[in-house]
Amino acid sequence: MKSHQTAQTMKPATAAKKLGVYLEATPAEFQEGVVSRAELNALQADPPQWLEELRANGPHPRPVVAAKLGVSIAGLGRGGITEPLTTEQIESLKKDMPDWLEKERATQAEVRKEAARIKKKNAEQTDGPRA
């Protein structure tokens, strides 16, 4: 007996998150429908003009803004950034380098350094001498 597989679908918000774009900036037909796994794969493999434009210029969702600025999402909040930003706004922040951004970048660098230290320590413990 052959089982009938149904297409896996997701809400537009989930698809936008996977594509790294701000949902409210996507076309209405994207926001109003459901997205199948095949459609998501097609969008990733051959992005339409609107998707390329959003990825290049924004507005970008907070995780993308945080990554482009080199800070955490919480760091964005501490810096007063609560709305999506365009690429131009992000570049302006990088150029102006306000105190909060400099501080949050330093904090993020310390967090990464500590995570690498812990990862190395754990690897040494699991790869240590064996009897």
Image: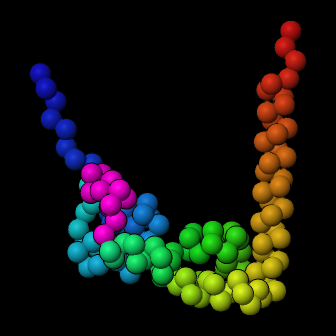
Q: Position of residue 5 (x, y in %)?
A: 19, 38
Q: Is residue 41 magenta?
A: yes
Q: Is residue 122 above or below residue 46?
A: above
Q: Position of residue 30 (x, y in %)?
A: 27, 71
- What residue sits 72% from the left and 80% below the top? 78
Q: Position of residue 37 (x, y in %)?
A: 30, 51
Q: Is residue 38 magenta?
A: yes
Q: Quadrant of residue 101?
A: bottom right
Viewer-closest of 50 and 4: 50
Our reading of the magenta stretch's main secondary structure is: helix
Q: Quick check: can you spot residue 40?
A: no
- What residue sits 65% from the left and 89% below the top? 92
Q: Is residue 131 left or right of residue 44?
A: right
Q: Is residue 50 left or right of residue 79?
A: left
Q: Quick check: can you spot residue 109?
A: yes
Q: Magenta part of the protein: which range?
A: 37-48
- What residue sits 85% from the left and 46% below the top? 117
- What residue sits 34% from the left and 65% below the top? 47
Q: Quadrant of residue 64?
A: bottom right
Total marks shown come to 0
Q: Is residue 117 left or right of residue 27?
A: right
- Quarter holding the C terminus is top right
- Quarter holding the N terminus is top left
Q: Position of residue 68 (x, y in %)?
A: 63, 72
Q: Is residue 61 left or right of residue 122?
A: left
